[in-house]
Image (cartoon, rainbow, N blue to C red):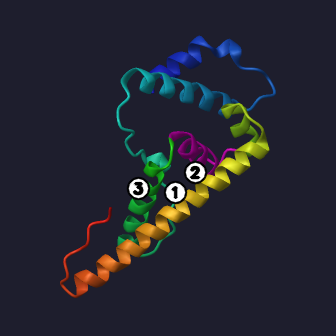
Amino acid sequence: MQEVFLRILRHRQTFRDGTPFRAWIYQIARNARIDHFRKSRPQVPFEPEMAPTVSPGDPAQQRQESELLHKALMELPEEKRDLLVLCRFQELPYEDVARLVGCGVPTVKVRIHRAMQELREFSSVAGCAGRSRQRAAAQNIPPRRMT
């Protein structure tokens, strides 16, 4: 975070009037993150900002769904995960995301669509595995290993 603020101060002259301020800051933060991981290459931890807002309901189910979403997001390649976080969770417009990524709006839409498809595939596979585990637990059957 500190590095991002320092970069904002250092590169404040690059902000152009008429461009969204929020998109400019995201670009700086994204570049700082890329530079950081280029140097160290650790595993990407889950960030609370990545979690969607959850409507009130059963807390156990919310926690389970949030964990499933987290696992699914972590399975996605970093580029797709970034797009989903920016568009779906940070609610940036496609135009701003396209500028950040350096491609056209139609390309962003296609990439987000494909990332959502991958999330659905993961959740359907994980959801089926979760239901079979619940049935097995109810019958005292040890869980099968997923390979």
Q: Amino acid at mark 3?
A: Lys
Q: Amino acid at mark 2?
A: Phe
Extent of the magenta region: 78-93
Q: Which residue is mark 2?
A: 89
Q: Is residue 108 left or right of residue 133?
A: right
User: Could you tell me which secondary element the residue under label 3 belongs to?
Assistant: helix
Q: Residue 130 at what x, y percent from top left?
A: 36, 73
Q: Residue 62 at what x, y percent from top left?
A: 42, 68
Find the distance from the CA under tag 1 to the CA under tag 3: 13 Å
Residue toward you, 139 or 93: 139
User: Could you tell me which secondary element the residue under label 2 belongs to?
Assistant: helix
Q: Which mark is residue 52?
A: 1
Q: Residue 127 at what x, y percent from top left?
A: 43, 72
Q: Which residue is mark 3?
A: 71
Q: Which quadrant would the N terminus be assigned to in this image?
A: top left
Residue extending farthest to the front is 147
| Secondary structure mostly taken by the magenta-highlighted segment of the chain | helix
From this view, report whether residue 1 is shown above or below residue 73.
above
